[in-house]
Image: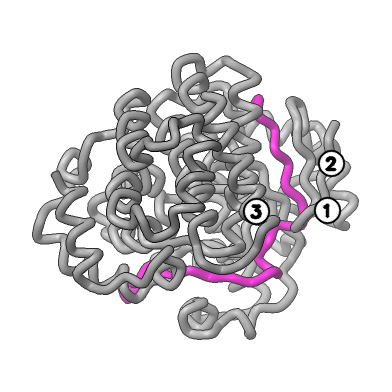
């Protein structure tokens, strides 16, 4: 079974979750606090994880993670972590569960308020070692199991990014079999999150050839070799699920280099709690418009993206992503998922203040985001 030691230790293969008990004991964890969501519990994946604990008893199981985790839940779970005398964390699920687990571990070990640690405020310097965290993804998209950060919507309405090497889970257990029951719609949305990570990380101006190579491999697997379309069409395709989980992992390795305007807009829209918008779906809708908007800014990089995606040399990458979206069932525009023109000014304002704004392939201003929002609105 492959064990990769890159940013962290990652056990990656079909059946990898069987290593959970051994992994926890290796970290000295005897009372793990499990963070997951209602869907994971409902489909039986939580029971499968618990069965792999062996003689280890959980200190507590929190299965109420909301989409786009909030500061209130971070505070609630941090208090529970301390009250139950937990000594480590198991995060099971998609990006929301893993992001909440990181926020919980941060608050439980460092104290609040959460806003002090936001990357935009220079909070990275305040973040030190956390309790051991083992991340078990059940979707292939966010890559939070290996990423240096998390996202949280604060009570002041801001959706903040947190970044530090100490936020990387100690071990990631990536078992593609845990994604075999994922519905086609969620497979598509999370898969496009991974695709967006690979593309935006590759395009950011920061120099990091290793990260760019990893991003291109993830893009080749997911789009060029067709794993995303295959996984959406046949959710039981184990090879496609393996490749998509690897593309997700690689996308997160790559975005240590940075992200860009797609994520700035998606973070800004995702802060609207009442809309309950899926991050991957937002990325998928914004991505083709941004690619058309910046075409010509980095011709050499666009040529390499075309090659990785299996496109002809003169192909419009934005059009290719729009076609892929349509083929896998992504909504056509923002209106289809409940956004309105009136949401635009706030989204633009928060996008300009988002950490990802600094990673655009060329400098963006307010007008750039206004144009992209208007085009994506439909």
Mark sitting earlier along the chain (2/1): 2
Screen quadrant of the N terminus: top right
In percent of width and height, residue 315 lies at 37, 35
- What distance separates the C-alpha of mark 1 from that of mark 3? 29 Å
**Where residue 203 appears, x then y in whole percent?**
49, 57
Q: Residue at x 62, y 57 (%)?
A: 147
Q: Secondary structure at mark 1?
A: loop
Q: Which range is magenta?
A: 154-177
Q: What residue is disc 2 on?
A: 3
Q: Is residue 54 left or right of residue 151?
A: right
- Residue at 14% x, 44% y: name it: 378
Relative to 374, say whether 245 is above or below: above
Disc 2 is placed on an element classified as strand
The crowding category of the residue bearing disc 3, from other C-alpha atoms within 10 Å (few below 14, some 14 to 19, many at least 20), is: many
Residue that appears at 56% across and 45% down: 36
Say whether residue 375 is left or right of residue 117.
left
Q: Nearer the viewer, residue 68 or 60?
A: 68
Q: Of the residues tagged 3 and 2, which is closer to the observer?
A: 3
| Closer to the eye: label 2 or 1 | 2
Q: Which is more toward the observer, 36 or 363?
A: 363
Residue on which disc 3 sits: 253
Label annotation for residue 30:
1
Task: Check the image and tell me how it is coloured.
Answer: one colour
Sequence-wise, the earlier of marks 3 and 2 is: 2
Disc 3 element: helix
Label disc, if present, on residue 63 of the rendered structure: none
How busy is the neighbourhood of tag 2: few (under 14 within 10 Å), some, or many (20 plus)?
few
The quadrant holding residue 102 is bottom right
Q: Given the current orientation, which residue lies at the most extreme left position?
A: 342
């Amino acid at each position: 079974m492959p064990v990769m030691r890159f940013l962290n230790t990652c056990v990656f293969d079909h059946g990898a979750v069987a290593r959970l008990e051994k992994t926890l004991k290796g970290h000295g964890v005897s009372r793990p606090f499990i963070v997951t969501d209602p869907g994971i519990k409902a489909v039986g994946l939580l029971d499968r994880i618990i069965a792999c604990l062996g003689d280890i008893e959980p200190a507590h199981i929190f299965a109420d993670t909301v989409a786009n985790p909030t500061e209130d839940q971070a505070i609630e779970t941090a208090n529970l972590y301390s009250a139950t005398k937990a000594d480590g964390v198991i995060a099971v699920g998609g990006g929301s569960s893993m992001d909440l687990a990181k926020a919980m571990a941060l608050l439980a070990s460092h104290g609040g308020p959460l806003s002090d640690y936001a990357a935009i405020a220079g909070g990275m310097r305040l973040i030190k070692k956390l309790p051991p965290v083992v991340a078990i993804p059940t979707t292939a998209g966010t890559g939070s199991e290996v990423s240096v950060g998390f996202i949280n919507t604060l009570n002041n309405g801001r959706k903040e990014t947190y970044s530090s090497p100490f936020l990387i889970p100690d071990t990631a257990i990536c078992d593609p079999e845990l994604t075999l029951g994922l519905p086609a719609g969620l497979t598509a949305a999370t898969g496009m999150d991974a695709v967006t990570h690979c593309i935006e990380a590759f395009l950011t101006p920061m120099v990091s050839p290793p990260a760019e190579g990893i991003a291109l491999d993830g893009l080749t697997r997911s789009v060029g070799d067709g794993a995303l379309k295959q996984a959406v069409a046949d959710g039981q395709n184990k090879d496609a699920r393996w490749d998509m989980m690897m593309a997700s992992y690689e996308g997160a390795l790559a975005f240590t280099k940075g992200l860009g305007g797609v994520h700035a807009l998606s973070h800004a829209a995702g802060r609207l709690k009442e809309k309950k918008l899926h991050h991957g779906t937002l990325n998928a809708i914004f991505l083709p418009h941004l690619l058309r908007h910046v075409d010509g800014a980095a011709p050499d990089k666009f040529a390499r993206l075309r090659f990785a995606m299996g496109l002809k040399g003169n192909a419009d990458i934005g059009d290719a992503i729009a076609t892929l979206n349509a083929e896998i069932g992504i909504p056509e525009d923002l209106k289809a998922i409940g956004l309105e023109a009136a949401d635009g000014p706030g989204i633009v304002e928060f996008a300009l203040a988002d950490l990802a704004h600094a990673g655009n392939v060329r400098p963006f201003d307010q007008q750039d985001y206004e144009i992209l929002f208007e085009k994506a609105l439909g």
